[in-house]
Image (tube, grey):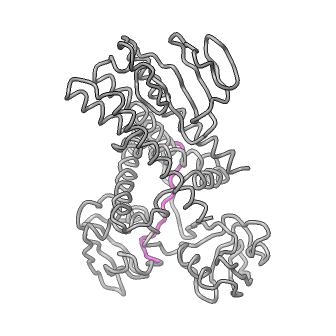
Amino acid sequence: MNYIIYFLITIAILVFVHEFGHFIAAKISKMRVDVFAIGFGKRLLGWNKLSGFSFGDLPDDFDGQGNTDYRVCLLPFGGYVKIAGMVDESFDVKFADKAPEPYEFRSRPTHQKLFVITAGVLMNLLLAYFVFAGINYFQPKQFAKTTTIGYVVPGTQAAKVGFEKNDKILSVDGQNVSYWEDAETKIYIDNIVRNIKVKVARNGKDLTLNIPRKTVSQDISKERPLLPAGFKVSIDSVIKNLPAQKAGIKKGDLLLSIGNEPVESHGQTTTLLSENKEKTLPLTVLREQDTVKLSVTPGKDGKIGVMLNEQFTGPVEFRTMGLGEAMWSGVTDIGRITSMTFTMLSNVVRGKVEFSSAFGGPVKIAQFAAKSADNGLISFIFFLGMLSLSLAILNILPFPVLDGGHFVIILIEGVMKREIPVKVKLAIQNVGFVILLLFMAFAIYNDILSL
C-alpha cells in the first residue's frame, strides 16, 4: 500500500509539473486548452467552468467553449494537455475537416509551437534545478574524509586499469583531492569525455594510472567500481516471514561477513547469496556496538528478504553552501547527471549494460519512492528531482508521442512552410504510442523479475 500511495504521489507531482508547462505556455501563446489530464484513458472525474464537477466521461458533443476540463483519468502512468488544433496523445482529429481557427495550435507560428512543446521539459528541468540547489543550500553536504580505496569491484574497468585496495588517490589530472566524493566526481564525471591520469600512493610509492576515456564511461552506469575505506553494506529493511527475519537480521545491521567471507559491496553480497541457494551460511553483523553471529539460509531464488543500502562509517565532514554556490551547484548537478544518463543510454544501445539495470518501470519507481520517503522528506524530494530530470531527458528524445518527436515534426513543418498531413501525423503518433506501450510493458516485466 505504501508503494501504491507514494507512486501515485510521485507521478501526480511530476505529471502536473510537466503538463502545467505545456498548459501555461499555450495560454501565454493565446491557444485554447481543452483538457488538462492526469493519467490516460477513461475520465474518472473532473471539473470545468461550464458543467462544474462531474464523474465519468463528458458527453461526446460537449463543447467547452474555450474552457479547460481539468480531469483525472484511469491509467496513472502519465498525463496530457489537449491543445486545440494539435495531433497529440488524445488522437482527436475532429478539427482536421475544418478551417484553422486563430486560437488553434496549427495556426500559430513555428516559434510559438516550439515554445509550447518544450515548456513541459523546461518545467521538469526547473523542478530538478530548484530541488538540487535548494537541498545544497538548506542541508549541509556530507563528505567522506578519505581518498583511500577500500574495495575494487572485480571485473570492472577500474580493476583492469590497475586500481588496487588500499591505494590512496592523491590527484586526478594534476588536481589534488581530499575527499572521496571529489575523487569520484573527477574520475567518473568531470573527465568523462577525455583520457585522465590518476596519481595514487601504493606501499610508500607514488604511481600514475593512465585511464582512457572509454574505460571511464563504461563503469559509471553499473555498480560503483571503487568504494572508499570505511564503506559498509547495511540492512535497509527486512521483509516479514522470509529467511532474513527468521535468522534474526534487523534493520540497521551492518554486514561484516557472509560464509566467512568479508562483505565489501552490494553486488558481492547478492552474488554470495545467489551462489548459495538453500545452503545455511554463517553471518556476522555489527549491531550498534555489538558484533553478532547469526546464520541464514537463502531461498530457492538465492534471496533472503532484505533491501540493502550503503553506509560510510569513516570520518566525515559537513560543508554548507552559500546562496550563490548552491545556485551554481544546481546547474552543475544537472549537467553531471545528464551526462551520466546519456552515457548509460549509449551503453544500453551498444549492449554493454543490461536494460533491466538501466531502466525502471512503475514497480521500481514505487519501490524507490517509498524507500526515499521512509528515509525522510529531503530524501523523497531529492528522488523527485532526479526523476523530474530523467523525465525531461527522456521526453526531449526525438521519438513519436514524446515532446522531442513533436519538436522534430514542428521543425520539419517550419522548414517546409506547410503542415504535414494530419493522417500522416496520426499514423506516426499511433506507431509511437504502441512502441511506448510495449516499452512500458517490458519495463514492468523486468521490474517484476527483479522483485
The segment highlighted magenta reads 137-150
Vertical arrangement, residue 16 with respect to residue 339, above or below = above
In the image, is residue 374 above or below residue 414? below
The residue positioned 68% from the left and 82% from the top of the image is 284
Residue 190 placement (x, y as % from top left): 31, 58
Quarter location, residue 155: bottom left
Which residue is painted at 33% across and 59% down in the image? 346
Q: Position of residue 303 (x, y in %)?
A: 66, 75
Q: Give the vertical position of 291 relative to 40 (above or below).
A: below
Position of residue 384 measured from the top left corner of the image (x, y, whole percent): 54, 45
Q: Quadrant of the C terminus?
A: bottom right
Q: Position of residue 307 (x, y in %)?
A: 65, 66
- Against 374, is 253 above or below? below
- Whether residue 416 is in magenta: the answer is no
Q: Is residue 54 left or right of residue 141?
A: right
In the displayed structure image, the side of residue 307 where residue 85 appears, left or right: left
Residue beneath the point at 33% across and 64% down:
350
